[in-house]
Image (cartoon, rainbow, N blue to C red):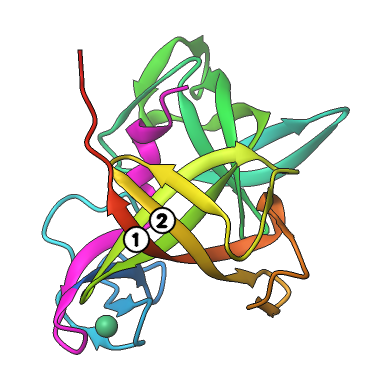
């Protein structure tokens, strides 16, 4: 699964003046020049992204089990999407990890196309969801994302390794607003807004 390919559409990593470090930022609105808000402290910067923003919404029909749902995929207008690409389909604010099963232009179906040419994108849920992490290491906060089965459970105290970071979960923010701080409750990946953690050690990895 090439989840990393389109993962940048979820958040922007930017330097926050208030936090004094690089943090997750989300656009405040859908407009092209939307200010960006720091996810940690809420500070809103007027600096908009200089690079091409993946703010183009492609109308998408997501197939989930027996049903189909209307949503959209975000991409840069010039970005080229291919059949079988992993993308995130957003349905009612929920990000669903999916793969492209059809690309429909005005008159025909194709194997690849620039985002702006696409009339309708057809995707299929792969059963995995994105989980966002904010992991603290000294004075730094490292934003990480990873995909999991929606039923995968997380709990406070659990140790996880992503990329070169090995960390322990300190609390879990759920979509229903609940903040899990103790070990007595588990959160399922599909119901999690963000997992917070503390780096235990940096893992050295050998790439062969
Ligand atoms: Zn901040």
Q: Secondary structure at mark 1?
A: strand
The local crowd at label 1, few if under 14, some if 14 to 19, many if 20 or more residues have their Cα within 10 Å, is some
Give the x, y percent position of residue 98.
Answer: 59, 31
Image side of residue 87 versus residue 182, left or right = left
Residue at the (74%, 61%) spot, across then down? 186
- Callout 2 touching callout 1 (CB < 8 Å): yes
**Frontmost residue, 3 versus 27:** 3
Image side of residue 39 versus residue 121, left or right = left
Q: Is residue 57 visible?
A: no
Q: How many marks?
A: 2
The circle drawn on residue 167 is 2
Q: In the image, is the residue at mark 1 within 8 Å of ligand 1 by its beta carbon?
A: no
Give the x, y percent position of residue 131.
Answer: 53, 51
Q: Secondary structure at mark 2?
A: strand
**Frontmost residue, 73 versus 201:** 201
Residue at the (75%, 41%) spot, across then down? 69
The local crowd at label 2, few if under 14, some if 14 to 19, many if 20 or more residues have their Cα within 10 Å, is many
Q: Earlier in the sequence, mark 2 or mark 1?
A: 2
The circle drawn on residue 199 is 1
Residue 92: quarter of image: bottom right
**Quarter holding ligand 1:** bottom left
- Is 76 rendered above or below residue 193? above
- Quick check: is 157 in the magenta stretch? no
Q: Is residue 46 visible?
A: yes
Q: Which residues are magenta?
A: 1-21
Residue at the (11%, 60%) spot, across then down? 50
Residue 46: quarter of image: bottom left
Q: In the image, is the residue at mark 2 within 8 Å of ligand 1 by its beta carbon?
A: no
Give the x, y percent position of residue 37.
Answer: 32, 79
- Is 194 rendered above or below residue 111? below
The circle drawn on residue 115 is none
């Amino acid at each position: 699964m090439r989840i990393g390919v389109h993962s940048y559409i979820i958040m922007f990593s930017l330097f926050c003046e208030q936090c004094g470090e690089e943090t997750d930022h989300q656009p405040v609105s859908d407009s092209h020049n939307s200010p960006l808000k720091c996810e940690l402290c809420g500070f809103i910067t007027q600096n908009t992204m200089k690079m091409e923003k993946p703010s183009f919404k492609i109308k998408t029909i997501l197939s989930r089990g027996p049903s189909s749902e209307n949503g959209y995929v975000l991409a840069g207008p010039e970005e080229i999407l291919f059949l079988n690409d992993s993308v995130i389909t957003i349905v009612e604010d929920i990000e669903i990890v999916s793969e492209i099963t059809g690309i429909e232009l005005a008159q025909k179906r194709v194997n690849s196309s620039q985002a702006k040419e696409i009339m309708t994108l057809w995707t299929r849920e792969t059963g995995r969801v994105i989980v966002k992490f904010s992991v603290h290491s000294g004075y730094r906060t490292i934003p990480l994302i990873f995909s999991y089965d929606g039923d995968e459970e997380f709990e406070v105290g659990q140790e996880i390794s992503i990329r070169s970071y090995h960390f322990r979960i300190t609390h879990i923010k759920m979509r229903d607003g609940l903040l899990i701080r103790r070990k007595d409750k588990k959160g399922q990946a599909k119901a999690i807004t963000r997992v917070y953690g503390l780096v235990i050690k940096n893992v050295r990895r050998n790439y062969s």
